[in-house]
Image: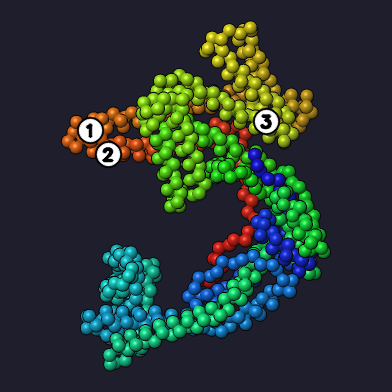
């Protein structure tokens, strides 16, 4: 139930003070900006506010990347640095231009040489390929009756091209293959020039002009000439890289410090995106968690004494037309189960976070249905391996490891090891095979408790919303809880034939009376509680009562699956053991028996583990969440220090 309270924070201050404050918020990772459209409703005032959507530091960071790009090195990881009040965009731009001027020229020269090198490599491939069929590039370039196209494409696209040209006046001739590319000549008739271009573009054909290739070649020994030019270009590119590496080596600390300063400013501007400016004063508004307000307040008081702040605590799900973001803060053990809840939906702001309940019940239900020491260990090993290989994300791998530990614990309680019950070790609690009645009874009790908790959480939500009518008289409120528990107790007394000082019939009369009250829920809320309630038709109220009654029965009966899958696990394990025993009488029986046992147990762990996982989710989402949970929240997405490098041009 750790949905953090949010505060709508607005700051107004001069430019030089706003940046240090924004930097602190970036480092704390606890500020989600709000667009000014939601902050300023006055159109005349909004017209005087200037905003800036683009981040000017993206361009400077891209220029700084040239330093490492020309040197052929990876970009460094930036470090948070203290902002200098005098370090503004224009000063930063001048420093970057002075720093990267020569290197930028080298970078442009390197790109030009690389493009020319690619053309020379194509020329070399063309000459080598055509010499094998006794043709020269000039002969193809001057062709009139068949239009040639020379170039390369991937192996897969070459196959696609061959399939495409079956019914088209197009002939593709393979010249050579290199790496994953195929160098080809494509011939077409003059009247099909546009059609050929569309087909070649569709398969990402990289064309090189035969005319340019022919003009580049000399008549005597063209291949040697091309190889010589390729070597010169490679040496030039290497020379530029070495020169850049030397400069980077001499000034690495200064370059990395400048890059970190630019990166810090870029993150600050990213946070301030959507800010407003009026006569040199900045207006910035956004969401912050309530528990970070004092830190931000102290930062502003210390580093921005001329900046004023206003706050507004919000309780409703919407604020000025914007849905309030949801920030969950749970301990480490519960945090991974937030993703299980998010698979259904993120909690709305102000709603009860079911993650702690899911963390407990998910683990218990999984172990109850899949209780086995050996299979639990295999599941733990599998989750650990898949987590390390990044096949499972970190949180899901953690959830599965917790579930596997629960399987081991319940395996001890059942005395079950690799499907063998009470043979290798005695049951510490009950045996699914020998205590089936008790197993089903526990499953039903678990269902009653789970559904009751869901109804209690619904009552808590109604109390927070001051909806006392539904809290007291609704089928999911106090009245419904009385009916549910009363029916459960009455059925338990009747089944167990327990003697009571009163007749069970009186309990059923009380249940019927309370059930009748739920029919007049809205009337009672208006008359007794003086609450404004929308009027609903009698037919709809009767249907709602009948629906609640059916839900009580079906939701409780659904928890029988806990015992059913525990028995299913025993049956599957017994089947594997039985089949393995039948292998002993066959040739190589020992090997076959071992193989059946290994494959059978792996099959149980993988298939039944997946099925049990799905069944637990069903119990959580439908039987539990259906009693109180709405979801539909927006995740709190603050501007953080870490950022990908997608802004850098390739």
Please, what secondary structure does the residue beneath circle 2 have? helix
| Distance CA(mark 2)–CA(mark 1) | 10 Å
x and y percentages locating residue 594 in the rendered image: 27, 37
Q: Quadrant of residue 49?
A: bottom right
- The crowding category of the residue bearing disc 3, from other C-alpha atoms within 10 Å (few below 14, some 14 to 19, many at least 20), is many
Q: Residue at x 35, y 79 (%)?
A: 122
| Residue 4 can be seen in this image | yes
Q: Between tags 1 and 3, which lies in front?
A: 1
CA neighbours of label 1 inside 10 A, class few (<14), some (14 to 19), many (20+):
some
Residue occupying image coordinates x 39% and y 25%: 422
Label located before the other in sequence (2 or 3): 3
Precedes in sequence: disc 1 or disc 3:
3
Residue 103 place in picture, x, y as percent: 54, 82
| Residue position marked by numbered label 3 in the rendering | 459
| Neighbour tally class for label 2: few under 14, some 14-19, many 20 plus, Cα within 10 Å | some
Tag 1 residue:
583
Mark 3 secondary-structure assignment: helix
The answer to which of 108 and 50 lies nearer the viewer is 108
Which residue extends farthest front?
Answer: 425
Nearer the N terminus, badge 2 or badge 1? 1
Mark 2 vs mark 3, CA separation in Å: 55 Å
Q: Residue at x 61, y 44 (%)?
A: 331
Observer able to see residue 57: no
73 relative position to 307: left or right: left
Residue 478 at what x, y percent from top left?
Answer: 67, 25
Q: Which residue is mark 2?
A: 595
Please tell me how many numbered marks the rendered image carries: 3
Image height of 47 relative to 289, above or below: below
Residue 39 horizontal side relative to residue 563, left or right: right
């Amino acid at each position: 139930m750790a949905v953090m309270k949010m505060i709508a924070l607005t700051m107004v201050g001069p430019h030089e003070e706003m940046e240090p404050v924004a930097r602190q918020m970036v480092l704390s990772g606890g500020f989600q900006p709000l667009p000014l459209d939601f902050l300023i409703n006055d159109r005349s005032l909004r017209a005087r506010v200037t905003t800036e959507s683009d981040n000017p530091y993206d361009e400077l960071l891209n220029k700084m990347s040239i330093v490492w790009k020309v040197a052929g090195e990876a970009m460094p990881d930036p470090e948070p640095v203290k902002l200098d009040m005098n370090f503004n965009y224009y000063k930063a731009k001048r420093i970057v231009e002075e720093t990267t001027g020569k290197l930028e020229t080298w970078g442009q020269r390197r790109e030009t040489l690389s493009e020319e090198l690619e053309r020379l490599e194509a020329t070399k491939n063309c000459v080598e390929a055509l010499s094998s069929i006794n043709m020269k590039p000039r002969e193809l370039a001057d062709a009139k009756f068949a239009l040639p196209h020379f170039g390369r494409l991937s192996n897969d696209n070459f196959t696609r091209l061959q399939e495409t040209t079956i019914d088209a006046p197009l002939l593709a001739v393979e010249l050579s293959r290199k790496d994953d590319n195929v160098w080809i000549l494509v011939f077409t008739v003059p009247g099909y020039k546009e059609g050929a271009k569309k087909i070649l573009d569709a398969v990402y054909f990289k064309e090189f002009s035969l005319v340019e290739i022919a003009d580049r070649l000399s008549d005597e020994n063209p291949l040697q000439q091309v190889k010589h030019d390729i070597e010169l270009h490679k040496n030039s590119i290497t020379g530029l890289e070495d020169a850049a590496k030397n400069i980077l080596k001499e000034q690495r600390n200064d370059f990395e410090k400048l890059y970190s300063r630019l990166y810090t400013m870029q993150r600050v501007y990213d946070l301030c995106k959507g800010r407003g400016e009026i006569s040199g004063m900045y207006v910035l508004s956004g969401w912050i968690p309530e528990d970070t307000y004092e830190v931000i307040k102290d930062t502003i008081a210390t580093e921005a004494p001329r900046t004023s702040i206003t706050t507004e605590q919000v309780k409703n799900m919407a604020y000025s037309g914007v849905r309030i973001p949801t920030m969950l803060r749970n301990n480490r053990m519960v945090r991974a189960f937030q993703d299980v809840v998010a698979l259904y939906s993120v909690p709305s702001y102000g709603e009860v976070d079911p993650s702690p309940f899911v963390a407990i019940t998910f683990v218990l239900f999984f172990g109850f249905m899949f209780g086995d020491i050996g299979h639990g260990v295999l599941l733990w090993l599998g989750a650990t391996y898949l987590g390390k290989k990044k096949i499972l994300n970190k949180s899901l791998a953690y959830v599965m490891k917790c579930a596997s530990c629960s399987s081991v614990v319940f395996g001890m309680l059942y005395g079950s090891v690799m499907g063998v019950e009470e043979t290798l070790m005695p049951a510490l609690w009950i045996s699914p095979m020998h205590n089936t009645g008790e197993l089903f009874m526990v499953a039903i009790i678990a269902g009653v408790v789970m559904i009751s908790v869901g109804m209690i959480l619904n009552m808590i939500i109604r109390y927070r919303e001051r909806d006392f009518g539904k809290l007291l008289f609704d089928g999911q409120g106090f009245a419904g809880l009385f009916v549910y528990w009363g029916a459960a107790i009455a059925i338990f007394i009747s089944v167990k034939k327990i003697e009571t000082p009163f007749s069970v019939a009186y309990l059923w009369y009380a249940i019927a009376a309370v059930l009748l009250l739920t029919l007049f829920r809205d009337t009672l809320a208006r008359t007794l509680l003086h609450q404004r309630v929308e009027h609903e038709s009698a037919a709809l109220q009767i249907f709602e009562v009948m629906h609640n009654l059916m839900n009580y029965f079906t939701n409780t009966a659904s928890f029988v699956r806990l015992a059913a899958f525990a028995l299913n696990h025993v049956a599957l394990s017994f089947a594997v053991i039985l089949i393995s025993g039948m292998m002993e009488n066959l040739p190589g029986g020992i090997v076959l028996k071992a193989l059946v046992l290994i494959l059978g147990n792996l099959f149980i762990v993988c298939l039944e583990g997946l099925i049990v996982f799905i069944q637990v989710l069903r119990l959580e989402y439908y039987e539990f969440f259906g009693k109180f949970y709405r979801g539909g929240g927006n995740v709190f997405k603050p501007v953080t220090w870490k950022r990908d490098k997608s802004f850098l041009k390739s």
